[in-house]
Structures are given as C-alpha cells and as structure tokens.
Image: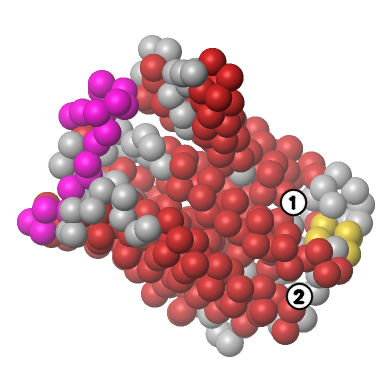
Amino acid sequence: MGSLEQTVYAILISFIIGVILCPIMIPLLHKLKFGQNVRDDGPETHLQKQGTPTMGGISFLIAFVVTGVFFMKGYTDNAAILLVTLGYGVIGFLDDYIKVVKKRSLGLRAYQKLLLQLIVTGCFCWYLHAGGTGTAVYIPFTNGMLLDLGILFIPFVFIAMLGTVNGVNLTDGLDGLSSGVTLLVASFFAIVAWAAGSTVSPVCGAIIGGLLAFLIFNAYPAKVFMGDTGSLALGGFVASTAFVLKMPIFIAIVGFIYLWESITVMLQVGWFKLTKRKYGEGRRLFKMAPFHHHLEKCGWRETKVVTLFYVATAMFCLIGFLGCKYMF
C-alpha cells in the first residue's frame, strides 16, 4: 500500500472513530460536570459558553493514537510523534482534571507543568539524537539547504517545542479556532511528508481525521471544547512532526498564528509591567490578549475572527509550500 493510500485510509479511519466517540463523550462530560469556566473579564459573548463540556480533546487523541498505532508498522519516527503527542495530551489532561474536578482554577502549578513539558521534550530530544535524525534543519526558500545547529540543536529543540505547544494552547480560545488552524497545519505536513517519501504521512492523516470529526462538534456554536488535553497534544504533534521532517523553522511560517498569538500575549504583559513601573499604573497595548480576543473586543464576531485565522493559515501554508518546493 502506497504512502498516499495509507494517509487517506488513516484520515478515514480516524474520522470514523472520532465521529463515533464525540457524541458518546459529550453527554458523559456533561454528566461528570466537566464544564468550562469562563473568565468574567473576557468578551461578553463568551459568558454563554459557561458549562460547555471541556476535555473533549480526549476524543481526537484516542482516534489519533488508535489509528496511528495501526499504521505505525515499526517505524520509530511514527512512534516518536505518537508518544510526544500522547505525552503532552496527558499533561493537558492532568491540568484540566485539576481545574475542573479539583476546582483549582489555575490547574497544574506553573513549575509542575513546565517540569512535565521539559521531561517529554527531553525524551524527544534524546530520540532525535539517538535515532539518527541529526542536528541539521532545512532552511526555507533555499534549494534544500540544511543548517547544522550542532550543540545549539538541544536548546533549539526545547525552545521550539515549548513555544509551539504553548502557542497552540493560547490559540485555543474561540469555537473551532485551534482545531481548524491545526487541521490546516497538519495537512501541510502530511502533503510534504508524502512528497518527501516520509513514513510519517499516515500519522499526519490520523490527526487530520480526528480533527475533522472534532470540528463538527467544536465549530461555532461549540458543543464541546478540547481543553488543555487537546491543545497541548496538538502542539506536541505539530512540533514533533516538524522536527522529524527536519522542518522546525517552517513552524514559524505555517504556524504563524501560534507565533502571533504568543507575541501579543508577551507584548501585552511586557508593556503592562513597563508602564506600571514608569507611570504607577499598567497600560495595555491590546484591548485583550491573545489577539483573537482583541479583535472580539473591537466588535468582530467570533465566526469572522475564526474565518480570518483560517484564511491566514491557508495562505501561510501555501507560502510554506513555496519554501520547500525542492521536496516536490
């Protein structure tokens, strides 16, 4: 069976599993009272989302893992992506569980979450070194030129992995936003992996199918949210897939939305602290951060913001294809 055929089957199988699981999980999450808590200082339209089941990312994570295992066939790169995605998903699950069940609004303490993320990333970094992937990465818009980072590869892995994971997490703030954006990013990597003859394209297909199923229930008005269980898992998937393909620099292009959301949060926090020190009171650069909330505060409808981010991601993915045309 060819790589393209395997990828299509992976999408279909994962989609079917996801479509079956979501309608089962939503009432179960309702029954367990695993509902979303909405911030009082957020957009007013979000108040109606209070109590919507969260932790729905479990559904596409199960669909992804089951399908991914089926198409793994002993390929270590596929196993690595599966384990990193699952590892980050478990961290997200613990965070959600503490928030929702233990009623501790902040979930895992910052140092606990960081420590767990460092452990998962450290294991993946060891795999990249021991598995022969090497320390070289492709430079976009060159004819397949590789940049060997040498000893700098280790800190680069940690910065890129943690940045991507938390960027995806920040993007998960509107109905269908993070799931739809990541669906496009995963499609980019699936096509590139297929074109390059990589074994990981069916694993990309597995996440695509799961997200397609999840979007049916997560699109506006959402019947379920993915929670940190889903958003951290998706970040782990994007980052690990990019590194296996030697394309981590491409995350800044195709996943520009993740980067921009993170930048707006850092600018907001930095400017607030700077102005508080200088003027005695903190001032804001944006009406609210991340940027999708700023647009809502400016009067944009939620669906319009999500559509804009989808279109932007699609355009950035097309630019990404131009950046790696040597693979086709």
Tell me which numbered mark, 1 or 2, is placed earlier along the sequence.
2
Disc 1 is placed on an element classified as: helix
Q: Position of residue 61 (x, y in %)?
A: 38, 64
Is 280 situated above or below 147? Answer: above
Drawn side of residue 83 relative to residue 28, left or right: right
Q: Position of residue 178 (x, y in %)?
A: 44, 43
User: Is residue 292 part of the magenta span, yes or no?
Assistant: no
Measuring 47% from the left and 32% from the top, which residue is drawn there? 290
Drawn side of residue 90 relative to residue 10, left or right: left
Inter-mark Cα distance, 1 to 2: 15 Å
Mark 1: which amino acid? Ile
Is 327 situated above or below 314? Answer: below
Taken as a whole, is the magenta stretch helix, strand or loop? loop
Measuring 85% from the left and 63% from the top, which residue is drawn there? 149
Instruction: Give the residues drawn in magenta, as a range.
Output: 31-48
Foreground residue among 229 and 277 = 277
Q: What quarter of the picture does the C terminus occupy? A: bottom right
How packed mark 1 is, by other alpha carbons closer than 10 Å (few <14, some 14-19, many 20 or more), is some
Observer able to see residue 90:
yes
How is colour applied across the structure in the image?
Answer: secondary structure
Is 59 situated above or below 283? Answer: below
Say which residue label 2 marks. Answer: 133
Q: Position of residue 20 (x, y in %)?
A: 24, 61
Measuring 21% from the left and 34% from the top, which residue is drawn there? 49
Measuring 31% from the left and 43% from the top, which residue is drawn there? 218
Q: What quarter of the picture does the N terminus occupy? A: bottom right
Residue at the extreme top of the image, as rendered: 299
Say which residue label 1 marks. Answer: 249
Dividing the picture into quadrants, the one containing residue 184 is: top right
Q: Position of residue 74 (x, y in %)?
A: 58, 87
Foreground residue among 229 and 112 = 112
Mark 2: which amino acid? Thr
